[in-house]
């Protein structure tokens, strides 16, 4: 078990709080209709408040083949920008402020 603290989406799953779970998980592929699926341990589902049917973002690294699953970020709810998305944008703007200023010149 490891303690993961992150305020970004670098660790594979976005997390804005502390979570404790195995950082390396060996999982088996299971049949899901005509596709294959990877199940997530209950501790991960609980830590990230994931729900059945929730959309997730999946990225495959072109060189290493690493598969990254991130809890999807809802951009809008009821026609409004979600607080989580607003925080993500604010964090990005803060981290990249100097780059944006240089590009604006």
Image (cartoon, rainbow, N blue to C red):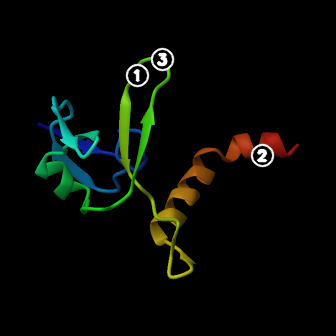
Which residue was labeled with disc 3?
A: 63
- Are dots 1 and 2 in contact, CB under 8 Å? no
Pick the front one: 47 or 64: 64
> Left or right: where does residue 65 sit relative to residue 31?
right
Task: Judge by depth and name the residue closer to the eye, 52 or 2.
Answer: 52
Q: Which residue sits at x=36%, y=31%?
A: 67
The vertical placement of 6 against 50, above or below, is: above
**Residue 96 coordinates in the image, percent (x, y):** 64, 44
Number of residues whose C-alpha sits closer than 10 Å to that of mark 3, classed few (under 14), some (14–19) or many (20 or more): few
Residue extending farthest to the top is 63
- The answer to the question of whether label 1 and label 3 lie on touching residues, with beta carbons closer than 8 A, is yes
Q: Nearer the viewer, residue 8 or 69?
A: 69
Label disc, if present, on residue 27 of the rendered structure: none
Looking at the image, the residue that sits furthest to the right is 105
Q: Secondary structure at mark 2?
A: helix
In the displayed structure, does residue 75 sit left or right of residue 99? left
Question: What x and y, as percent, mark residue 104?
Answer: 84, 46
Q: How many marks?
A: 3
Which residue corresponds to mark 2?
101
Q: Quadrant of the N terminus?
A: top left
In the displayed structure image, the side of residue 57 where residue 79 appears, left or right: right
Discs 3, 2 touching: Cβ within 8 Å: no
Question: Which residue is pictured at 51% across the width and 63% down the height?
Answer: 85
Nearer mark to the viewer, of 3 and 2: 3
**Residue of label 1:** 65
* Residue 83 in the image: above or below residue 21: below
Disc 1: CA contacts within 10 A as few (<14), some (14-19) or many (>=20): few
């Amino acid at each position: 078990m490891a303690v993961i603290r992150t305020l970004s989406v670098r660790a594979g799953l976005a997390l804005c709080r502390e979570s404790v779970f195995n950082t390396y998980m060996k999982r088996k592929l299971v049949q899901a209709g005509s596709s294959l699926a990877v199940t997530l341990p209950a501790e991960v589902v609980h830590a990230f408040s994931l729900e059945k049917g929730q959309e997730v973002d999946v990225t495959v690294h072109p060189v290493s083949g690493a598969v990254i699953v991130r809890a999807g970020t809802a951009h809008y709810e009821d026609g409004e920008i979600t607080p989580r998305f607003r925080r993500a944008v604010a964090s990005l703007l803060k981290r990249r402020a100097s780059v944006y200023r240089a590009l604006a010149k």
